[in-house]
Amino acid sequence: MAKSINSRRVESNQTGVHEHLQKIVKKHMAEPFQKPISMHTLLAFDDMIETMERRHVKSVILDSGCGAGDSIISLAHQFPESTIIGLDKSLVRLQKSQYKSVPENVMFVRADQFDFWRLVGKSGCNVKQHFMLYPNPWPKKSHAKRRIFGHPAFVILPKICKNIEMRSNWLIYLQEFAEAWQLLTGDKCYVNEFEADEPITLFEKKFKESGHPLYRLRTIED
């Protein structure tokens, strides 16, 4: 008998955009992030740049929080002219990719994503598009600062790339990112519910099979 899929929906004590979102984002806009960058991320970034130079890489697509690499493989086929960089902090998750057929235009980087973003933002690296697929929503109201909009490195994102796509099964998460992005850049985001005809991550597959509505945010309209 096939195993049934019944992933839990996001449960939160929030019913809308966090009441302190603007206060949090404005604070990060006013106060540069001074925390030292971790050494392992510095080394990983230097290795990546060296590899890119050796391969004569001209354009990059970044997948932050790529996990075991399913989305990377899909993106690599979708954008064969770009190098797809899969970023994740977990060695265990990244090691799972070695058992998959990974295209040649893929690079995996093990690093802290927030430190990595800061390095990319300063490097001038040509990031064509930035994907963030099903990040941990941290749904408790008290955990808002753990979400992407709540982290000091959020303000670095426009310096990396203004073409961002984020997916989630919690609409509020994307609504918060959209409001924070508009506060930071003056530009609106486009959020819609969508059908994942061919899921590109394990989370997307699991949520789809569990009957969850799926939502997509884009900073640039199709």
Image (cartoon, rainbow, N blue to C red):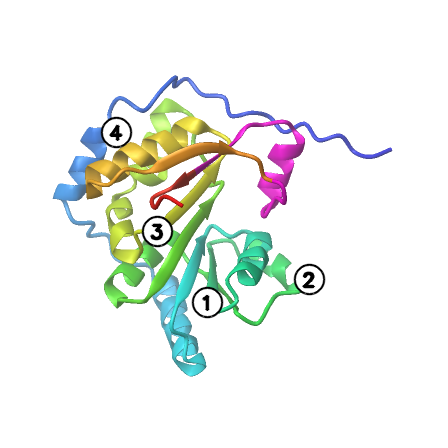
Q: Earlier in the sequence, mark 1 or mark 4?
A: 4
Pick the residue in front: 46 or 199: 199
Pick the residue in front: 190 or 122: 190
Q: Is residue 204 magenta?
A: yes
Q: Which residue is depicted at the point 30% across and 51% down?
A: 162
Secondary structure of the residue carrying numbered label 1: loop
Q: Earlier in the sequence, mark 4 or mark 3?
A: 4
Instruction: Give the amino acid type for the residue marked by disc 3 in the picture.
Output: Asn
The answer to whether marks 1 and 3 mark residues whose Cβ atoms lie closer than 8 Å is no
Instruction: Give the amino acid type for the residue marked by disc 2 in the picture.
Output: Tyr
Q: Residue 98 is drawn in which quadrant?
A: bottom right
Q: Earlier in the sequence, mark 4 or mark 2?
A: 4
159 relative position to 165: left or right: left
Judging by the rendered image, the residue that carries numbered circle 2 is 99
* Mark number, residue 163: 3
Q: Which residue is depicted at the point 63% across and 57% down?
A: 96
Pick the residue in front: 18 or 160: 160
Judging by the rendered image, the residue that carries numbered circle 1 is 82
Q: Residue 53 is drawn in which quadrant?
A: bottom left
Judging by the rendered image, the residue that carries numbered circle 4 is 21
Is disc 1 surrounded by few (<14), some (14 to 19) or many (20+) residues within 10 Å? many
Where does the magenta region start and end?
197-216
The picture places residue 76, in percent across and down from the top left corner, at 54, 62
Quarter the N terminus occupies: top right
